[in-house]
Image: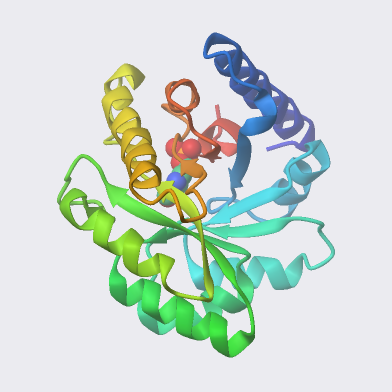
């Protein structure tokens, strides 16, 4: 796709985020956009950065590493948004600035251990399988509290917040209850531990449902197709 088309798409997405913020009486500065570059290569990535993108999302550790090494000149942060296998935790810590997909105690422990080895504190989101879909990664609803509590004790993790993927549906409205449930869980966790630094973030919303996610409090949306898919 031509760079000018990607620039136009980026502007449209930002406008749609701003409009959703207005509907919800939110400040658009409170919503970040992760440009999900998993399906595209360097020319498209450079185009979206030229348009203003500063956060890039990849779902696989090795692809993210390859792209980051090829584009080390870009002033961006790299976000791992896909399921992480513990044997890739070292590279995940080495090549990503933020991990959105901590979905089990084992993954949390591995990231913490590798972050300690690297002398870093890594911002992470705890991924919650709000809808309980078999096909999706994410901590079960029933285990999310314990996973958050355990992760909070890990000195090399900075708990940025919670993440979810709503089940795919043609009607974005059907995602609303899932996003709302994640926000309520975050608020409940914060109320239960007033002595702890608050969990601030909600990583939720993709191409098909990001406006609903913003209306329900998303602080960071992860968008690929709306930026990069062939029309
Ligand atoms: C691919 C992906 C996205 C972006 O999806 P689009 O529908 O293309 O916007 C967001 N989050 C995760 C976890 C993904 O894997």
> Furthest residue to the bottom?
117
Q: Residue at x 33, y 34 (%)?
A: 184
> Furthest residue to the front?
195
Q: Residue at x 63, y 78 (%)?
A: 120
Placement of the N terminus among the 4 image quadrants: top right
- Residue 114 image point, x, y percent: 51, 84
Q: In this picture, is 102 found above or below 88?
A: above
- Residue 60 image point, x, y percent: 47, 65
> Would residue 112 be seen by someone viewing this image from the given angle?
yes
- Residue 202 image point, x, y percent: 47, 41
**9 to the left or right of 214:** right
Viewer-closest of 114 and 146: 146
Identify the image quadrant of residue 180: top left
Number of labels in the image equals 0
**221 to the left or right of 95:** left
Q: In this picture, is 90 found above or below 66?
A: below
Ligand 1 lies in which image quarter?
top left
Viewer-closest of 170 and 231: 170
> Would residue 103 be seen by someone viewing this image from the given angle?
no
Q: Residue at x 61, y 44 (%)?
A: 35
**127 to the left or right of 43:** left
> Which colour style is shown?
rainbow
- Residue 47 image point, x, y percent: 77, 43
Q: Residue at x 71, y 34 (%)?
A: 6
Placement of the C terminus among the 4 image quadrants: top right
**7 to the left or right of 36:** right
Viewer-closest of 211 and 197: 197
């Amino acid at each position: 796709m031509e760079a000018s088309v990607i620039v136009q798409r980026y502007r449209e997405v930002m406008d749609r985020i701003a409009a959703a913020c207005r509907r919800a009486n939110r400040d658009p500065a409170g919503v970040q956009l992760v440009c999900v570059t998993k399906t595209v290569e360097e020319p498209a990535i450079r185009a979206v950065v030229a348009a203003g993108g500063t956060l890039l999302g990849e779902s696989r550790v090795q692809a993210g590493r390859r792209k980051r090494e090829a584009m080390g000149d870009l002033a961006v942060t790299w976000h791992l948004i896909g399921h992480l296998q513990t044997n890739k935790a070292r590279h995940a810590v080495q090549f990503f600035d933020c991990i959105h997909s901590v979905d089990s105690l084992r993954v949390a422990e591995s990231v913490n251990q590798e972050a300690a080895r690297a002398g870093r504190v890594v911002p992470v989101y705890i991924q919650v399988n709000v809808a309980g879909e078999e096909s999706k990664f994410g901590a079960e609803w029933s285990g999310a509290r314990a996973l958050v509590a355990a992760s909070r004790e890990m000195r090399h993790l900075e708990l940025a917040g919670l993440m979810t993927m709503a089940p795919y549906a043609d009607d974005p409205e059907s995602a609303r209850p899932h996003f709302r449930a994640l926000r309520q869980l975050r608020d409940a966790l914060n109320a239960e531990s007033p002595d702890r630094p608050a969990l601030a973030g909600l990583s939720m919303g993709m191409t098909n449902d990001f406006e609903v996610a913003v209306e329900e409090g998303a602080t960071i949306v992860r968008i690929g197709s709306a930026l990069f898919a062939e029309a």
